[in-house]
Image (cartoon, rainbow, N blue to C red):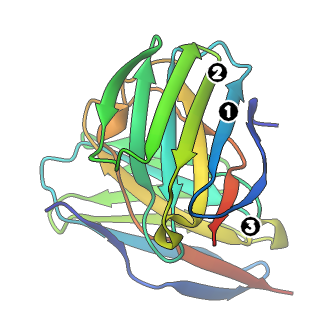
């Protein structure tokens, strides 16, 4: 079946450094990719998304990179701040919101 | 504030109890969702409602029964649950069921089945 996996369950970075969180997916037909952030005691929060017709998209301090050849997705956070500490997970899907496949999450720890 | 509220935030229930989880969205959205989030496992979609009609039921056991009386409210009725049903239950809403529409999540109900 389809799967979405993150490379590392935990990532520890120094405050001010850049963070890179990676995600691999199995379904080559996936054409929509999303990153979510989940802080302790809260529900997931949308960060950024990208369609398969793009390979890069930038937001505020975040960049998502998509490599369809190797079915790999990454989230880059520039100048990581303590408020970025959370669990990050990716999701892939197609046209329907209820066909999203979620990854299990990477916990980002920011060292002061 | 995401505009999606869930009550209760925490719930402990025995296997013979009947309880209900409530979700309310204040965003004027037409689609609502129930997800299950277990420790170290990916988010699992349980049910989807669009314009108060169920459009997806992901092989969820019948001990979970959803209800969507209107587009702003969603309930999850629970009865004779098992300990493995202990998890965080998340509600979400979106403008529609196209993947283009961002899903807004509530804070979740932490359920413990004893």
Q: Position of residue B47 (x, y in %)?
A: 41, 37
Foreground tag (2 vs 3): 2
Q: Quadrant of residue A66?
A: bottom left
Where does label 3 land, which residue?
A84
Where does label 2 land, which residue?
B73
Q: CA distance from mark 1 to mark 2?
A: 6 Å
Quadrant of the rendering where the C terminus of chain B is positioned: bottom right
Q: Mark 1, residues whose alpha carbon is within 10 Å: few (<14), some, or many (≥20)? A: many
Instruction: Name the chain letter of the residue that bears numbered label 1.
Output: B
Foreground tag (1 vs 3): 1
Q: Up-down: is B38 above or below B104?
A: below
Does label 3 lie on the same chain as label 2?
no
Residue B104 lies left or right of residue A32; in this view the side is right
Q: Quadrant of residue B113?
A: bottom right
Q: Mark 3, residues whose alpha carbon is within 10 Å: few (<14), some, or many (≥20)? A: some
Residue A47, numbered circle: none
Residue depicted at x 50% and y 59%: B81
Residue depicted at x 33% and y 72%: A5
Looking at the rendered structure, the secondary structure element under dot 3 is: helix
Instruction: Name the chain letter of the residue that bears numbered label 2.
Output: B
């Amino acid at each position: 079946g389809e799967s979405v996996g993150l490379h590392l369950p935990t990532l520890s970075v120094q405050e001010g450094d850049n963070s890179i969180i990676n995600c691999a997916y199995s379904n080559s037909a996936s054409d929509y990719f999303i990153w979510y952030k989940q802080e302790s005691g809260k529900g997931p929060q949308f960060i950024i998304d990208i369609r398969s017709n793009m390979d890069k998209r930038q937001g505020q301090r975040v960049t998502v990179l998509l490599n369809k050849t190797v079915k790999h997705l990454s989230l880059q956070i520039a100048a990581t701040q303590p408020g970025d500490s959370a669990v990050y997970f990716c999701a892939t899907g197609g046209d329907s919101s209820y066909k999203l496949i979620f990854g299990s999450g990477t916990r980002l720890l920011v060292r002061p | 504030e995401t505009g999606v509220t869930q009550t209760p935030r925490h719930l402990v229930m025995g296997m013979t109890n009947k309880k209900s989880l409530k979700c309310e969205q204040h965003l004027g959205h037409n689609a609502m969702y129930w997800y299950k989030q277990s420790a170290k496992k990916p988010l699992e979609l349980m049910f989807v409602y669009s314009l108060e009609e169920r459009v997806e039921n992901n092989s969820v056991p019948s001990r979970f029964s959803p209800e969507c009386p209107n587009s702003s409210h969603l309930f999850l009725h629970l009865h004779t649950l098992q300990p493995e049903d202990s998890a965080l239950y998340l509600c979400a809403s979106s403008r529609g069921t196209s993947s283009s529409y961002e899903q807004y999540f509530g804070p979740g109900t932490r359920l413990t089945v004893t």
